[in-house]
Image (cartoon, helix red, strand yellow):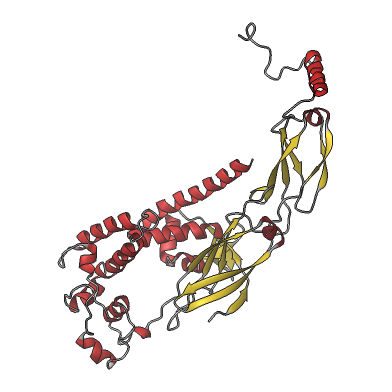
Amino acid sequence: MMTTQTLEISWLDGQETLSLSELARVSSLNTDELNELVDYGALIPLVFVQAGQPQRHFSAAFAMPLREASRLRMDYDLDLFTVAILLGYLCRIESLEQQLRSASVA
Amino acid sequence: MKYKDYYATLGVERDASLDAIKKAYRQLARENHPDLARAAYSEERFKDAAEAYATLKNPEKRAAYDRLGAHQGGADFAPPPQWESDTAGSGFDGMDMADLLAALSRGRAHPGSFPRDGRDLESHIEISLGAAYQGSVVQLALADETGRRELEVTIPPGVCDGQKLRLRGKGGAGKNGGVAGDIYLHIHLLAHPIFRTDLYDLHFDLALAPWEAALGAQVQVPTLDGPVWLTVPPATSSGKRLRLRARGLKNRDGVRADLYAHVRIDVPAVLTAREKELFQALADVSAFRPRGAPTSGEPT
């Protein structure tokens, strides 16, 4: 049976941030794995202070490339370091695609 | 329940090492991955290989699977004895191999006793430029394990081509206390007959007559809010861009980007005698040399 629900949306772009746990949920990686990606330099955290404690947040622009890298990790049984490399290339591809779109209209 | 021969799926012996299993899986994944393979059967093969590998790479699951014994792939088979004793004969119908092995390898009595998060769903939607400018409501038709459903999504002004949106908790339903999945929306803007988009900026081609470009002119140009008059300055060359401030799309903060007119100088396809005469007179008196002076002689 078809049901209709109404809802609002959240944005996944550089203007939004995601907490460590939210990024873990979005990417299907756990928080330890995300912290390891930070150690590799693949993810750049933004540190906020909440209730006196520093909390890692991330640009929501990472969400979709990270989901893609995580999916490829599962599909090909890749290790986390490879995910770090992949993430760099996926972010670069996204940026180049945007540049290509801009160049094609200008 | 139909038996699945995971070893046959991966093309390895039952006593294959983990390395051999991994190698076989990666080879199949490479050949059949939906991102790369185009054959109709590839996706199914990839899913089968992934299911087989998920079990055989995990020592507990592999041991549980091996305890089921060897059967012909696709053959009906009965639940293992420990399953009957653990569950008092309940819960076997309607299960698949993955559920069974997950339950056995965890030593749980019932597959329904551990939480399972709902599936994330991805959807691509196309909206018009007008909808991106003014906001819109789109209907998403979704199909997952809970059946078919329709979701009404309010997309506010401020999306651009390539934007990704997340609908939290609106994906597949979780089971046994697992959280619901999310929906990821990929927004694509439909091509517009006049405007092209670059994020929130809009661009269009502005055709000018040679005399408008040379002398300057007031010309009517299209915008999302209706036509406006644009002042073309004298000596406007082809390829020049004229900016109409705050006539582009609104970003999510409500700030409008710009509209750019790309000047293109058109000439009449057919000149009247008088037009030809006037152009010739201009050519005779003008010292303008767009390519500089020729370096040698006359054309041959």
Query: Residue B109 occupies which quadrant of the picture?
Result: bottom left
Q: Taking B277 as reference, is B5 left or right?
A: left
Q: Where is the C terminus of chain A found, in terms of image quarters?
A: top right
Q: Taking B9 as reference, is B156 left or right?
A: right
Task: Name the residue: 53% across, 82% down.
Answer: A1
Q: Is residue B300 above or below residue B226?
A: above
Front in this rendered view, residue B165 or A15: B165
Question: Residue B94 at x, y = what percent?
Answer: 34, 83
Question: Residue B74 at x, y = what percent?
Answer: 24, 74
Camera sees residue B155: no
Give the residue at the far bottom of this rendering.
Answer: B88
Task: Name the residue: 62% across, 54% down.
Answer: B190
Front in this rendered view, residue A65 or A51: A65
Q: Is residue B262 above or below residue B177?
A: above
Q: Say how many tags the image has.
A: 0
Query: Residue B21 occupies which quadrant of the picture?
Result: bottom left
Front in this rendered view, residue B300 or B255: B300
Task: Name the residue: 59% across, 71% down.
Answer: A51
